[in-house]
Amino acid sequence: MKKIAIVGGGAAGYFVAANLGKTVGQQTVLFEQATLPLQKVRVSGGGRCNVTHACFDPLDLVEFYPRGKKELLGVFYTFQPGDTMAWFDDRGVALKIEDDNRVFPESDSSLSIIEALTKAVDQNKVQLNFSDGVQEIAKVEGGYELTTKSGTHFFETVIITTGSTPKFWKSLKTLGLKIIQPVPSLFTFNCKDPRIEGLMGISFEQTEVKIINQKLEADGPMLITHWGFSGPAILRLSAWGALKLNDCGYKFDIEINFVNQSKDEVFTFLNTKKQIDAKKNVHKNNPFEFPKRFWISILNYCQIDENKVYADLSKKQVEAISTELCQGRYAVNGKSTFKDEFVTAGGVDLKEIDFHSMQSKKIPNLFMAGEVLNIDAITGGFNFQACWSEGYVISEKLKEIYQ
């Protein structure tokens, strides 16, 4: 008789199954409603799979998690990004650390990660039930009754790795677990503004973005898109501000520093340009590293005549340009989901979980990992790392029980 059920075939569920070993694996069934597993892994990083992040000190690592920081510390001391990299390396997947410390397979294909996981799960003899999602879960004497498309099944132990699925949160609530209302965590900012109209695709290497009247700010690369602003700086803000931004209906003002310099520094720099390049046309000579199209847009917004040379810029005009580049204010009205990598803040309250084992504190033999929990991180491989680490902790506990 199969004793263990894993509900959900994503990163967390598959990593549990991949680390069980044959003795425990043969007692396990994995249920997944889709026809194929690991859908988020498949699309992550544009199909390259940002498998983890090269941050090897758990104390530093937890700082990238707006929710789950305190709880994950012990989990990361058990299994951290270095362990993840070693795990895949041992299974023939060569990984590389990019300049921003994101970790990808050398193949630049998520299939390398998927193949390693599926092979490990197959070797452990875990039974895979695809197109057989769990519709209901009930606590019964001695275990759990799962209702799926294929029928009703009894298991002594259940591992929930269903991701951010409202329907399943409702089922867990009926078991007596507290659910934190989920809201989007990673999203881009919608903004219609003449200063960025028609400039989609323009990127900035280092920006500083603040949300006005909120203690929220982030720095990093930024991108102008069809709908407004995206890129790491924006996504970090969306993660840290997930709850507050939801409360204000995603309508708020931001201040952007496009040049990573103070307003005084830019003001002084432009005044120097007036001396050195006095006769040069302002529109035709962009003194900054960002694309010329953005420079011209800012000049037009500041009503700088296209025939004006640097020497003719007034103090007021230099002030206006400096303000736009260092303290530009933009009205955000709405959000857009970040590609296919949808992440939520919310889920099972972390107070419900014993993080030494990832087991429910009040419901025996019920384990949880991944986005079903109220844990999320910024982009860069951190959300996957939480899945790998939590999944590993669960597999170790299951081997302790059933091996």
Image (spheres, helix red, strand yellow):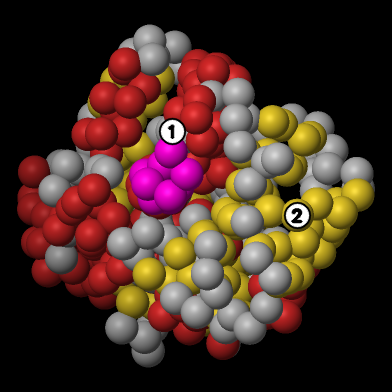
Quarter of the image with the C terminus in it: top left
**Span highlighted in magenta in the image:** 394-403
Counting residues from the start of the chain, the first of labels 2 and 1 encountered is 1
Query: Secondary structure under badge 2?
Result: strand
Whole-number angstrom distance, CA of label 2 to CA of label 1: 23 Å
Is 117 within the magenta? no
User: Compared to 57, does 177 lie above or below?
Assistant: below
Residue at which label 2 appears: 154
Q: What residue type is labelled 1?
A: Asn
Could you say which is closer to the camera, residue 269 or residue 136? 136
- Horizontal arrangement in the rendering, residue 126 relative to residue 82 (left or right): right
Estimate the x, y position of residue 66 in percent, counting from the top left: 36, 68
Residue 228 occupies quadrant: bottom right
Q: Are marks 2 and 1 in contact (CB under 8 Å)?
A: no
Residue 123 occupies quadrant: top right
- Horizontal arrangement in the rendering, residue 341 relative to residue 207 (left or right): right
Q: How crowded is mark 2: few (under 14 residues within 10 Å), some or many (20 or more)?
A: many
Estimate the x, y position of residue 19 in percent, counting from the top left: 43, 33
Query: Secondary structure under badge 1?
Result: loop
Is 397 within the magenta? yes
Residue 194 occupies quadrant: bottom right
Residue at which label 1 appears: 19
Residue for point 84% across, 38% down: 131
Residue for point 45% across, 28% down: 21
Please name the predominant secondary structure of the magenta segment in the image. Answer: helix
